[in-house]
């Protein structure tokens, strides 16, 4: 069966029926132009740039030339939300030596990039996007010096196999407490830098996300659902207390890992890897009661089962399912959560594989109440002005879409600087040079 990204409506419609994925589709995409209120702020449209790390910062954690280039292109591209990439709260939580790392002593560089985004967007589009900073600690995937220095919540044989990570790398409760304090401090710095809000990152098996499945961990961060969600809830509460009433506190949240119990969140304890929304729904309701209005929902682990969170046409392995089935699991799963907690404003994920039909599918879900914003990840590397085309014509251009070839991910996993090798000549040159140096 053809697994190429969709360049025509006919191909999508045929496979949507054949695979029984039941994705809604609306020819009228005008709903994507609507503005949406979040607290005291107004988002100018329903299109969002997801947090896509560029691995192109300076050693001191500040944005560098390529970082500024990426955000200038996104600012001019017209999206209503720019979810600013993973920004470390501590040095030992950096995923690579070039990951952004916000601190008091480098805050001016963050003030500049936020100001530049707003000015570039206003000049190009007449409005500024909502800008949310993703505050992170990479935990299991920490590589602050370019080699693995994992800090984990528990040993996981699915990832570690017959070479378990030394138990000295398992974080104590007091060490997790200090990570929480650092995430709250990063939230304060984000507000000071001028961001509209902060995301206490809890996805893709970084430390906050890993704790969600710490069923067999002892102490206050393991075992019960209340304990496993403690760090996230306390960080969000702390960030809310430490920032102003107009500052948005949110999370990019993994609601399903795709691993069986006791190693995966969002699955039944009775076995299997099907999505079980019961614990995620409990968590969403808790966050809403705390005052959270806005969440960015995702699934899977980009290091281990990337087909779950970013279905691909070409990748390093055969996932055993058609990419459209992965898209359907994500979008229908998000819609199921939205139905249970309709007061929350929610951003979707896993849209890039849809290609040219992404706007119509997004419009269909939004009209059905499935989610509120369409979150594009890999697309923004290939097609930074995707939103402008959708807002102006209701369509995406097939000659500009991401083809989901996984080369950007290949670059990132190999320690390079990811970008779109196919659509951006600068990154084509970087890719060729990088591949040549690694031979």
Image (tube, helix red, strand yellow):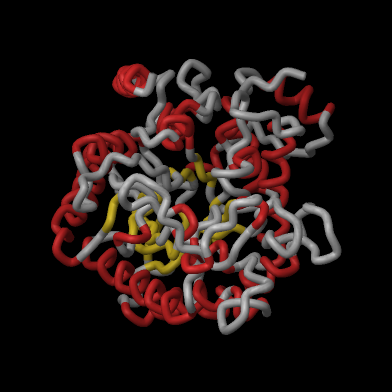
Residue 340 in view = yes
Name the quadrant containing residue 386.
top left
Q: Position of residue 287 (x, y in %)?
A: 56, 74
**In the image, residue 376 lies at what x, y percent?**
50, 40
Residue 20: which quarter of the image? Answer: top right
On-image quarter of the C terminus:
top left
Please tell me whether residue 258 is drawn above or below residue 364 in the rendered image.
Answer: below
**Nearer to us in this view, 21 or 209:** 209
Residue 346 in view, yes or no: no
Question: Which is nearer the eye, 420 or 163?
Answer: 163
Q: Which image quarter is the N terminus in?
A: top right
- Residue at image coords 60%, 63%: 155
Identify the residue at image location x=51%, y=45%: 375
Q: Is residue 227 left or right of residue 120?
A: right
170 above or below 98? below
Q: Residue at x 55, y 44 (%)?
A: 303
Q: Residue placed at 76% from the left, 33% from the top?
A: 321
Horizontal side of residue 151 vs 225, given as left or right: left
Label tally: 0
- Residue 171 in the image: state x and y as whole percent: 48, 71
Query: Looking at this view, is 391 or 160 the one in front?
Result: 160
Q: Is residue 235 above or below residue 101?
A: below
């Amino acid at each position: 069966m053809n697994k190429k990204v969709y360049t025509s409506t006919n191909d999508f419609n045929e496979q949507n029926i054949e695979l029984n994925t039941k994705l809604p589709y609306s020819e009228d995409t005008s709903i994507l132009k609507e503005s949406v209120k979040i607290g005291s702020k107004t988002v100018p449209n329903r299109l969002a740039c997801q947090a896509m790390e560029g691995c192109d910062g300076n050693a001191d954690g500040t944005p560098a030339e390529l970082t500024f280039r990426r955000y200038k292109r996104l600012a001019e591209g017209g999206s209503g939300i720019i979810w600013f990439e993973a920004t470390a709260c501590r040095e030992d939580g950096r995923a690579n030596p070039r990951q952004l790392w916000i601190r008091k002593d480098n805050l001016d560089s963050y003030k500049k990039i936020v100001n530049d985004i707003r000015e570039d967007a206003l000049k190009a589009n007449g409005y500024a996007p909502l800008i949310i900073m993703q505050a992170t600690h990479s935990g299991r995937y920490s590589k602050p010096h370019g080699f693995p220095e994992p800090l984990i919540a528990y040993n996981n044989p699915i990832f570690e196999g017959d070479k378990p990570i030394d138990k000295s790398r398992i974080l104590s409760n007091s060490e997790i407490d200090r990570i929480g304090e650092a995430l709250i401090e990063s939230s304060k710095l984000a507000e000071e830098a001028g961001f509209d809000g902060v995301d206490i990152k809890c996805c893709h098996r970084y430390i906050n996300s890993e704790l969600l499945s710490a069923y067999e961990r002892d102490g206050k961060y393991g075992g019960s659902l209340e304990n496993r969600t403690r760090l996230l809830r306390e960080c969000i509460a702390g960030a809310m207390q430490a920032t102003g009433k107009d500052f948005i506190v949110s999370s990019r949240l993994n609601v399903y890992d795709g691993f069986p119990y006791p190693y995966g969140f969002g699955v039944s304890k009775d076995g299997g890897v099907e999505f079980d929304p019961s614990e995620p729904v409990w968590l969403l309701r808790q966050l809403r009661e705390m005052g959270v209005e806005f969440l960015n929902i995702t699934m899977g682990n980009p290091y281990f089962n990337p087909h779950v969170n970013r279905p691909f046409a070409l990748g390093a392995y055969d996932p055993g399912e058609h990419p459209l089935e992965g898209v359907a699991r994500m979008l229908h799963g998000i819609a199921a959560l939205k139905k249970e907690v309709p007061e929350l404003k929610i951003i979707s994920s896993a849209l890039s594989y849809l290609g040219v039909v992404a706007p119509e599918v997004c419009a269909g879900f939004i009209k059905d109440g499935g989610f509120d914003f369409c979150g594009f990840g890999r697309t923004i590397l290939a097609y930074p002005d995707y939103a402008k085309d959708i807002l102006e014509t209701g369509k995406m251009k097939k000659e500009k879409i991401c083809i989901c070839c996984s080369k950007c991910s290949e670059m990132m996993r190999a320690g390079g600087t990811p970008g779109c090798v196919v659509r951006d000549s600068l990154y084509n040159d970087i890719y060729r040079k990088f591949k040549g140096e690694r031979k």
